[in-house]
Amino acid sequence: MEPHFQSERAQLPRNMIENSMFEEEPDVVDLAKEPRLHPLEPDEVEYEPHSSRLLVRGLGEHDLEDDEEDYESSARLLGMSFMNRSSNHRNNMSEAYNREASGGPCSVPSARTVLVGAFVVVIILSIAMVVYFLPKCTFTKEGCHKKNTTLTFVYPLATNGQVFPWPKIRLSNAVVPIHYDLALHPNLTTMNFTGFVQISLQVNEDTNNITLHSVGLRITKATITPEATSQPKDVQVLEYPPHQQIAVKLNPVLSRGEKYILNLEYSANLSDNFSGFYKSSYQDKNKKRILAATQFEPFAARNAFPCFDEPAFKATFSIKITRDADHISLSNMQKDTTTPVDNGLYQDTFIESVNMSTYLVAFIVADLKNVSQATASGTLVSVYAVPDKMDQLHYALDTAVKLLKFYEGYFNISYPLQKLDLVAIPDFEAGAMENWGLITFREIALLYREETASILDKQIVTMVIAHELAHQWFGNLVTMEWWNDLWLNEGFATFMEYFSLEKIFPELQVGDRFLHTRFRAMEKDSMNLSHPLSTPVKTDEQIEEMFDSISYEKGASILLMLKNFLTETVFQQGIVRYLNEHQYGNAKNEDLWNSIAKVKSIDLNMKEMMKTWTLQTGFPVVTVKLDTTANKIHLSQERFLRISILQDPSSSPDSSYLWHIPLTYITSSCSNYSQPKCIKTWLLKNKTDTIDLKEPNVTWVKFNLNMSGYYIVHYEENTSKELIGLLKNNHLALSPQDRADFINNAFMLASAGKISVRKALSVTEYMKNESSTAPITETLLQLRHIYRLVQKRGMLLLAARMKKYIFDIFGGLIDQQTWSNNGSLSERQLRSILLDLACDYNYGNCVRDANELFTKWKDAKDFSLQPSDLTTTICSVGARNVEGWKFILEMYHYLQSAAEKRKILMAMAKSNNAQHLIWLMYESLQHGVIRTQELPSILAASSRSLVGYLFAWDFVKENWDNLVKKFHLGSFSIQIIIIETTSQFSTKSHLSEVQTFFDSLTDKSSQLRTVQEALEIIRLNIQWMDKNLKNLEMWL
Ligand SMILES: [Zn+2]
C-alpha cells in the first residue's frame, strides 16, 4: 500500500523542536465553544475568533483492558505455550476453564487436597516467576513491563451466550484454508450484497472447532462437508465480535489429516468508509453513478467474506461475481466465463488464483472504461477509470508496461498472472493498493494529463506505479509472515520505487525526493517513542500504526545503505535468491538476511550488521574528530535521540545501543566525490574507533556521502569549522546531497542539544551562493519551520526578522525565477518552491505576477491554468479575496483532472479566511463537493497557517468520533490528522490541552502510539523554544 500524498512536496510532519526562553502569553483555544454547524455555502460560515483563555479539562483515566494481555500473561506465568500444546490437552483445559468461568457445580475438596494443591501452586508460581521475569529483563532493551497477571484462562462468551471456543486474537493453526470458492452479488441500488463461500480446509491437529474471521456479515446458513462422505451437515456458527471471529464447534472432533469444506451463506451492507467491500460514487454527465470496490489491507477481507484473515494463511481463490448488464466486474485473475442468470443479471467467473494472502484479494463492480496493451512477455496490462477520464490513462499504461518489464528482468522471475489491471477509484483512502493483478489507486496517483499536470505530478504517478508493481514480488509473491515485519513489504516497495525510476526514468530525478525521505524517517526515528523496524504487534490499532514512516521510509533507507555496502550486483543476487526461496510463501526478517548471506562471497558480518538496524529502535550519531597533527580520525557512536526533558528528566541515550555502521567518507586530499577512488569506507562496529589516514595533510573530512547511510554525523568543533569554511569558500567541493545532509544534520544536532541553534544557523550563511535544489529545499524547510513556530507564539517581530533573513539569502535566486514550466525536474521543482515562498510571504512582485496570471485564467475560455507547475501558488493568491475563492471553488466542480483539482484545493486550504477553511473541513467531512479522502490534507494545510491551525485542532476535537468512523483508529490518515494538527504547538497550555483531550476519549485513542508521539513533539517544541529562542533573537 502507498500512503496518500499531502502536498506537492509530500511533507509528512517535519517536527522540529521549538521555542522560548520566556513565559510568553500562549496561543489559546476556547474549548467551550459549541461545534459549528456545517454551513451550506462557504460564505455562510460564521467566523468566531478564539477567546483569550485556554480552558483545560480535568485529566481522564483510561483503562488498559485487554483480555488477550491477561490470557498471554497467564500462559507465560505458567511457563507454557498454549498454542503448542496438543489439542486434547487444550480441549481439556478449555473445558476446565469453561467450568470455572461459568461457575458451575463442583465437588468440595478435602483439606489435605487443598494444602497439597496450594503447595504445588506455590512451587509452580515460584518457578514460573523466575522463568517469566528473568529472560524478559535480560534480553530486551525495553526493560520489564509490568503485566496484569492472572491464573485464569477466560474463554469469552459468544453473542448467543455460549462459550466461544477460541480465546486468542490470532487464529489457531489447527485448521487451515486451502482454497476458497467465493460467489458475491453486490446490489448497487440497495447498497448491500449477498455472498456464498465454500472454504476447503485441511486439519493439521485434532480439534473441536474451526475459528475464522468475520465482521458485519449476517450468516444465514452454515454447513460442513467432510471430504470423505461429501454429505453436508448443518452447523451452528458462534460469533465473538471483539475479536472479529466466528467459530463452529464440532462433535466429534476433526482429526488430523482430514479435509472438510465449510459452506457459509451470508449478507451484508456495502461499507460506508474506505475499507472492506465499500461503495464509491462519481458524477457522470448528469447522473450520479455508484460503484463498489474493495480495500482489504491490513484486515478487512473479513468484512467481505468469512476467512482466515492473516497474511500467513495463504490459499487459492475462485471468485464469481453477479452484476447488472451495464456494469463490469474485475478481480485478481482474468475472467473465464460470463453467464446470464435470473432477472437480467450476469455472473462473471474468474479463473483460480495463485496461492495468496486474503489481504490481496480484490474485486470491483463498476462501469469503468479501459485502455490495454500486452507486454512482450504476454501479460495484458490495462488501466481503468470512470468514462470521462479516458484521456488520462495512457501515461500510466505506458509506464506500467515499462516497469513490469524492468522488474521481470531485475528479479528474474516472470510476473505470474496473465493480466494486470490498474484501476483509479474515485473514493480511495490510500495512494494505492497492490492487490495481486488488480491494483487500485486514488485517481491522482494514476491519472495523468500532460497539459494540466505539474512535473511533480508525473513523478508521483510514476513512483506510485513503481511501488505497487514492486509489491507484486515483494508482498504478493513473498509475504511477511505477520504484520510485525511489514517493512519487508513496504520498505522494499518504497526502495524499489526510487531504484527503478533511477534506472528507467532518470529524467524524473527522484534522488532528491529519496534524500528527503531519509531525512523524514530520521526525524520520526529520533524520538523516544520510535520503534524498531521489526516490532511485535497484536491489536488492530497496533497493526494499523505499523503503516508509518518507519516501515516505509526507514525500511527503504536501510536497504539503500545495504545495497551500497554489498554492491549493486550482490544486493540483486541476494534479493533474487530471497524471492525464489520464499515464493508463494511467507518470510520473516531473518529469512531475508539468510538468503542474502548465501550469495557467494558475502561477508557474514552482514547478518549481524542488519540486525542492529532492524531490531534496535532509532539510529546512531557518529562523532567525528579529525586530528590533523596525528593524521587520524577519531570516531565514536551513540543513539541519536531528541530527548524531552519535561517528559523524563533522567532520560539520556541508552549506552547499550550499538550499530554496525558502514561508513563512507572523502577527505580534502582526494575530494572529488564523483571519483570512486576518492570514496573511502570503514565499518564502525564498536563504540569508538580510529582511522589512520594514509594521505598526508588532510584538512577536512565529510562522512556519509550523499547521506546514503542511515546515521547522523556530528563533527567536533574544529572539524566542523573546516567544513563550514569549505561551504563558504567552495561549496561545490561537496555534492548537493552532501550539502543538504550537512545542513539537515546541523539542525538535527541543534534539536538534540548537541550544538547551539546559532551554529546550525551559521551553516546556512553560505546559501547566497547556493543554487541546487536539495540543499535549498532542506534549508527552507528548517527555517520555515522555525518561522511558523515563532509566529504562532505571537512573536511577530522575531518572525519578521526571520522572514528577512530568509529573503536575504534567497531573494536573489527568487528574482531570477520566471513563471514557466521550463527546465529539468529539479529546476522546475526549485522554481515552484521559491515562488510559493515568495507569494506566501508577499516578497517582491510575486503576488502581483500571480494575480495577473490568475486574472488571465479567469478570463480565458480553455480553462487551463498555466504554467501548470505553479497552479497552487497562483490560485493561493487568487483565493485571497472572496470572489477569487468562489471562482476557484466553481472550477473545482468543473475540472476533470484529479491532479489539477488537488492543486487548486491545496490553494484553497492555504486561505487566510477562517470561514473558508472551516467550510472546507466540514464539506470534506460530509463528503460534499470535496471528497472525504481529502480531509487529512486539508487539515494539514490549515494547520500550517496562523489563521487555520487552531481551527483545525478545534475541528479534530469536535468531530473525533466521526473521524475515526471514516478512517480507522491508527490508520495513516488518523496519524496524519493527529500529528499535523498538534505539531505546531509549543506551549505547556497546549500540551495539557492535547493530553486532556485524548485522555478524555472513551475509545482506545489515548493508547495510540501516534498520540504519544504528538505529545512528545509538543514537549520537544516547548523545550526547543525554552532553550533556543534567546539565541535565535541574538543571532537574527
Ligand atoms: Zn506499499
Image (spheres, helix red, strand yellow):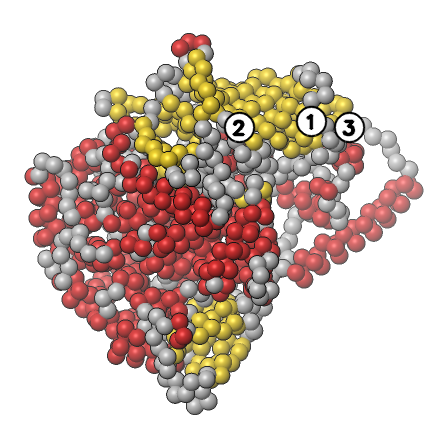
Mark 1 CB lies closer than 8 A to ligand 1: no
Query: Earlier along the polypeptide chain: callout 3 or callout 2?
Result: 3
Q: CA distance from mark 1 to mark 3?
A: 35 Å
Of the pair 196 and 845, the residue shown nearer to us: 196
Q: Residue at x 44, y 74 (%)?
A: 680
Q: Residue at x 52, y 53 (%)?
A: 575
* 207 relative to 600, above or below: above
Residue type for callout 2: Glu
Q: Can you tell me whether the CB of the residue at mark 2 lies under 8 Å from the nearest atom of ligand 1?
A: no
Disc 3: which residue: 104
Q: Which residue is mark 1?
A: 259
- SS for tag 1? strand
- In the picture, measured across the screen, residue 955 lies left or right of residue 478, that is left
What's the residue at 74%, 31% (across, down)? 256
Residue 97 position within the rendered picture, expressed as x and y whole percent measured from the top left: 75, 34
Question: Picture coordinates of residue 803 (x, y %)?
Answer: 21, 64
- Disc 3 crowd rating (10 Å Cα; few below 14, some 14-19, many 20+) is few
Query: Of marks 1 and 3, which one's residue comes earlier in the chain?
Result: 3
Could you say which is closer to the camera, residue 332 or residue 76? 332
Q: What residue is disc 2 on? A: 352
Amino acid type at circle 3 is Gly
Cα separation between marks 3 and 2: 49 Å
Q: Position of residue 341 (x, y in %)?
A: 45, 11
Q: Mark 2, mark 1: which one is toward the viewer? A: 2
Q: Quadrant of the N terminus?
A: top left
Between discs 2 and 1, the one toward the N terminus:
1
